[in-house]
Image (cartoon, rainbow, N blue to C red):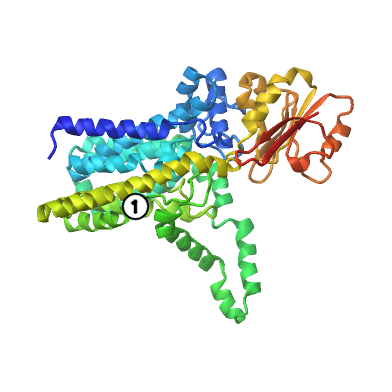
C-alpha cells in the first residue's frame, strides 16, 4: 500500500512525536519527583558511587528501600543517565522517556509481525505514542512502564518464534528481564503462558526440544529471584496488598456479618473467606473493563493517571470493538495471543485491594488495545473507501477532528491544570525546602524535617546529592521498621520526627535538644503560633506546604 520510504518517514514521525510528548516539560509535568523516583535515583547513584545500595548491600537483586523491596531493573538502568547528567530530576526522568519511546517502536514491529500490514503497524504505534495511559507512566520513573518494554520485546520474539523456533530463547530473555523489573510482570507472564499454551499446543509440540530448552533457560534466568518471590520478603510484601490479607480480611468479613439482618446460616454462607475473596477478585477484575476506566475517568490514583480522561480516547471505542471482531472473523493466527494477553493482564491486580481500578499494575494490557484499535481503523476506512469515496473522506475528517479535539483537550489539561491540582499528590515542595536548607546548612546544629508528607529523608539525600558512603557509614543513622514500611528517624544532623503526633510538637523537640541551634521544616498545622517564618513553600494551588523557621 505504501512504499518503504513513506513507511519509514511515517514511522520516524511517530517516534519523534512520541518522544516529544514524553520529553516536553519533563521535570515540571508531573510537577515533582515522587518518593519512588527519588528512591530509584538515589539508589542508582549509590550503586554508581559505591557499588552498594542505601542499605550497604553490594549489587543487590532487590532493593529494600522503604521496605517494599523494589526489583532491580529500573535502578540499574537509571545509572547511565545519572552518570552522564548527575543526580537530578532530569537524569531520573530521561530514562523512562527513552524506553517509553522505544516501546512505541517495538509496538510497531510487533504489530507488523502479527498482522503483516505496514498500515496497521503504523496506526498501532501512533495510538501507543499518544496514549494517555502510556504517556503518563513514561513521563516519570515508573517500573511498570520499563517492564512493559521487555514484555513487548518478549512478545515480538515469541510471535517470531512460530517461524523460527530458536527465537524463543530471545523471548525468554526479555520476559525474564520484565520479571526483574516490576511485580506485575511476574504475576502476568505465568498466567499468560498457562492460558496461551492450549491454543498453540500443536505448534509447540513440533518444536518440543526448543520449547523445553528455552523454558529451562528462562527458569535459570529467574532462579536468583525465584526464592525471594516464593518464600522471601517479596511474598511477605504481597500479603500486605493482597485481598487475602489476614490482618484486614477477617475483620472486614465479621463487620459485614454483624451489619447484616439475614439469618445466621445465610450470613455464614454469604460472608465467609471464600465468597468474600471471590467476590472482590471478580469485582476488581471487571472494574478494568468499565467505560469509566477505559474511556471516561481512568484510574483514581492521581500519580498513575492525570484524571478527567480515560486510559484510552473514547473515539477508540468503536474501532476497538470492530478490531476484536475482525481478528476472529479473519482468523488471524495470533488472535488467541492477543486475547489471552488482554484477559490475563488484569488478573494479578485483581488479587490486590488498593486503588482499584489500577493503571500502573495493568499497563501490560495497553498495547493490545492499540492493536485492536488499529485493526478496526484500518479495515473500517478500507471498506468505506471501496464503497463511497465521499463517505470515506467525510468519516476520515470527522474521526480526525474528534481525535484531535480529545487529544488537544487532554494535553492542555495535562500541562495547565494537572500539576496545579495534584502537586501535593506528587510530594511537591520537598525540592524547594531542601534547596533552602542546603544554602543554610552550616548555620544549624540540627535540622528537623517533618515526616507528614512521607519519606523526607530520601528527598534530603537526593537533592543534597548526599555522599552514599557517608550515609551508609553514618553512626547517627537511625531506622525503624513497622509491619509494612521502613522509616529513617535520623542521619547526620537531620532529624525526621512525626511532628503531628501527640507529644512530639516543635516545642517538645526544642526541649529534647536544649542549647542547639535548630532549623525546622514543618507543615502549617505543626507550626507554633507567632513563629517568625524564614521561608515558605507552597503547593502549586497556593496552599501552604512547608514553613521553615528556627
In the image: residue 340, left or right of residue 357: left
Can the viewer see residue 267?
yes
Label total for image: 1
The quarter of the image holding the N terminus is: top left
Residue name at image x 51 percent, y 68 percent: 275
Rendered location of residue 450, percent (x, y): 73, 36
Residue name at image x 34 percent, y 52 percent: 342
Q: Nearer the viewer, residue 433 or 396?
A: 396
Rendered location of residue 184, percent (x, y): 45, 45
Q: Quadrant of residue 43?
A: top right
Task: Please rate how many residues cluster around mark 1, counting C-alpha atoms within 10 Å: few if below 14, some from 14 to 19, many from 20.
Answer: some
Q: Quadrant of residue 150?
A: top left
In the image: residue 528, left or right of residue 29: right
Residue name at image x 78 percent, y 45 percent: 501
Rendered location of residue 289, percent (x, y): 39, 58
Can the viewer see residue 213?
no
Q: Is residue 286 above or below residue 366?
A: below
In the image: residue 404, left or right of residue 185: left
- The residue indicated by pointer 1 is 342
Amino acid at each position: 500500500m505504501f512504499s518503504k520510504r513513506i513507511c519509514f518517514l511515517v514511522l520516524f514521525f511517530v517516534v519523534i512525536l512520541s518522544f516529544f510528548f514524553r520529553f516536553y516539560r519533563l521535570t515540571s509535568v508531573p510537577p515533582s519527583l515522587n518518593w519512588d523516583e527519588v528512591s530509584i535515583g538515589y539508589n542508582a547513584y549509590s550503586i554508581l558511587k559505591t557499588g552498594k545500595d542505601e542499605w550497604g548491600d553490594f549489587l543487590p537483586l532487590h532493593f529494600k528501600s522503604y521496605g517494599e523491596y523494589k526489583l532491580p531493573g529500573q535502578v540499574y538502568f537509571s545509572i547511565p543517565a545519572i552518570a552522564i547528567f548527575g543526580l537530578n530530576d532530569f537524569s531520573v526522568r530521561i530514562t523512562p522517556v527513552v524506553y517509553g519511546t522505544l516501546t512505541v517502536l517495538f509496538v510497531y514491529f510487533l504489530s507488523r509481525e502479527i498482522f503483516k500490514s505496514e498500515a496497521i503497524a503504523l496506526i498501532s504505534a501512533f495510538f501507543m505514542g499518544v496514549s494517555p495511559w502510556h504517556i503518563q507512566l513514561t513521563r516519570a520513573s515508573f517500573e511498570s512502564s520499563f517492564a512493559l518494554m521487555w514484555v513487548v520485546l518478549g512478545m515480538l520474539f515469541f510471535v517470531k518464534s512460530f517461524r523460527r523456533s530458536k527465537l524463543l530463547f530471545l523471548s525468554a530473555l526479555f520476559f525474564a528481564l520484565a520479571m526483574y523489573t516490576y511485580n506485575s510482570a511476574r504475576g502476568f507472564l505465568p498466567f499468560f503462558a498457562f492460558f496461551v499454551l492450549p491454543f498453540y499446543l500443536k505448534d509447540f509440540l513440533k518444536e518440543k526440544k526448543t520449547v523445553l530448552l528455552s523454558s529451562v533457560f528462562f527458569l535459570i534466568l529467574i532462579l536468583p529471584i525465584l526464592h525471594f518471590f516464593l518464600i522471601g520478603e517479596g511474598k511477605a510484601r504481597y500479603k500486605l496488598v493482597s485481598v487475602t490479607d489476614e490482618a484486614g480480611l477477617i475483620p472486614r468479613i465479621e463487620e459485614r456479618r454483624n451489619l447484616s439482618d439475614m439469618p445466621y446460616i445465610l450470613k455464614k454462607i454469604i460472608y465467609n473467606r471464600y465468597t468474600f475473596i471471590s467476590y472482590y477478585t471478580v469485582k476488581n477484575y471487571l472494574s478494568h473493563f468499565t467505560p469509566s476506566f477505559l474511556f471516561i475517568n481512568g484510574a483514581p490514583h492521581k500519580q498513575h493517571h492525570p484524571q478527567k480522561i480515560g486510559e484510552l480516547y473514547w473515539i477508540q471505542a468503536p474501532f476497538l470493538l470492530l478490531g476484536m471482531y475482525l481478528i476472529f472473523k479473519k482468523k488471524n493466527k495470533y488472535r488467541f495471543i492477543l486475547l489471552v494477553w488482554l484477559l490475563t493482564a488484569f488478573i494479578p491486580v485483581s488479587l490486590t485491594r488498593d486503588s482499584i481500578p489500577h493503571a500502573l499494575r495493568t499497563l501490560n494490557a495497553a498495547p493490545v488495545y492499540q492493536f485492536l484499535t488499529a485493526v478496526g481503523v484500518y479495515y473500517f476506512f478500507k471498506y468505506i473507501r471501496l464503497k463511497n469515496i465521499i463517505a470515506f473522506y467525510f468519516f476520515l475528517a470527522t474521526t480526525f477532528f474528534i481525535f484531535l479535539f480529545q487529544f488537544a483537550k487532554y494535553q492542555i489539561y495535562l500541562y495547565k491544570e494537572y500539576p496545579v491540582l495534584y502537586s501535593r499528590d506528587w510530594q511537591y515542595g520537598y525540592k524547594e525546602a531542601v534547596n533552602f536548607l542546603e544554602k543554610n546548612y552550616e548555620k544549624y546544629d540540627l535540622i528537623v524535617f517533618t515526616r507528614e508528607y512521607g519519606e523526607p529523608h530520601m528527598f534530603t539525600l537526593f537533592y543534597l546529592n548526599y555522599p552514599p558512603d557517608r550515609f551508609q557509614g553514618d553512626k547517627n543513622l537511625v531506622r525503624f521498621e513497622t509491619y509494612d514500611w521502613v522509616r529513617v528517624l535520623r542521619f547526620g544532623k537531620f532529624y525526621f520526627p512525626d511532628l503531628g503526633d501527640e507529644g512530639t510538637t516543635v516545642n517538645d523537640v526544642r526541649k529534647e535538644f536544649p542549647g542547639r541551634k535548630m532549623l525546622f521544616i514543618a507543615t502549617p498545622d505543626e507550626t507554633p503560633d507567632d513563629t517568625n517564618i524564614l521561608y515558605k513553600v507552597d503547593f502549586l494551588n497556593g496552599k501552604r506546604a512547608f514553613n521553615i523557621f528556627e
